[in-house]
Each structure stands twice: as C-alpha cells, then as structure tokens.
Amino acid sequence: MARAHHDRRTPGDWLRGLFRQPPPGFYSRPAVYLSGDRMEIEHFCTVLFFDENKLCLRLAKGRFTVYGSGLRICTLTAARLTVQGQFLRTDFSDE
C-alpha cells in the first residue's frame, strides 16, 4: 500500500506557523473557567438575569445561562464575572 503524500515544510516555515499571531478578535472571545465551586466568565456583554439559582449573560453572539444553587457573584468587572456556588448545568443559545 502506498503512503500518503504529505506537504514538506522547512523548519523555518514550521516555526513561523507555530508562532504566528492568532486571528483578529481571538482575545475578546468569551471564555469560561470552572474550578471547584467557582466559575469565571470573561468577555460577556450584559448580565440579563441573576438570582441564587440562575445566571444569564448576553454574549456578543448568543446567550450563556448557568443553573445551580446558592449562586453568588463574587467579583464583577466590565470584562470578567466570578460566580460561586453549586453548578448544575450550563446552556448556550445563539439568540
């Protein structure tokens, strides 16, 4: 059986590809980090709803909802929100 032909790249091309700049807007995309009973959400637009069982955020291209119990907002800045509690599930919709 013949081997598939692969593109041959020079080491310089390979390094340029490895260290290239990310696409425009990459660093402003929403990100969610979960560690134990804390969740950090970055780059959201608006807090639409919050109570001890639900947090709903508007993102640039959708809506992100966190369901849980005993939820409380620990920190809130223009770029980041930290919420603590017991997390049951998350939903994303592109409304």
Image (tube, rainbow, N blue to C red):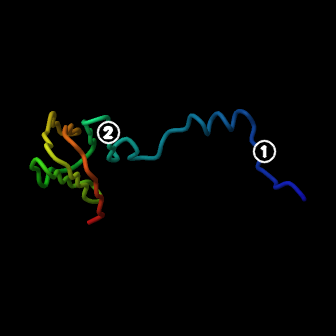
Q: 10 Å neighbourhood of mark 1: few (<14), some, or many (≥20)?
A: few
Q: Is residue 23 above or below residue 91?
A: above
Quadrant of the drawing holding the N terminus: bottom right
Residue named by callout 1: 8
Q: For numbered disc 2, what is the local secondary structure?
A: strand
Give whichever of 29, 40 is nearer the camera.
40
Earlier along the polypeptide chain: callout 1 or callout 2? 1
Q: Which mark is residue 45?
A: none
The residue tagged 2 is: 34
Q: Position of residue 26 (x, y in %)?
A: 40, 45
Q: Count of labels shown?
A: 2
Residue appearing at x 89%, y 57% in the figure:
2
Task: Please state which amino acid type lies under the numbered disc 1.
Answer: Arg
Residue name at image x 26 percent, y 42 percent: 41
* Image coordinates for residue 90, horizontal then vertical, percent: 28, 53
Residue farthest to the bottom? 95
Q: Nearer the viewer, residue 2 or 14?
A: 2
Q: Residues within 10 Å of mark 2 (few under 14, many from 20)?
A: few
- Residue 13 percent coordinates (x, y): 69, 38
Displayed quadrant of residue 14: top right
The answer to whether residue 28 is left or right of residue 74 is right
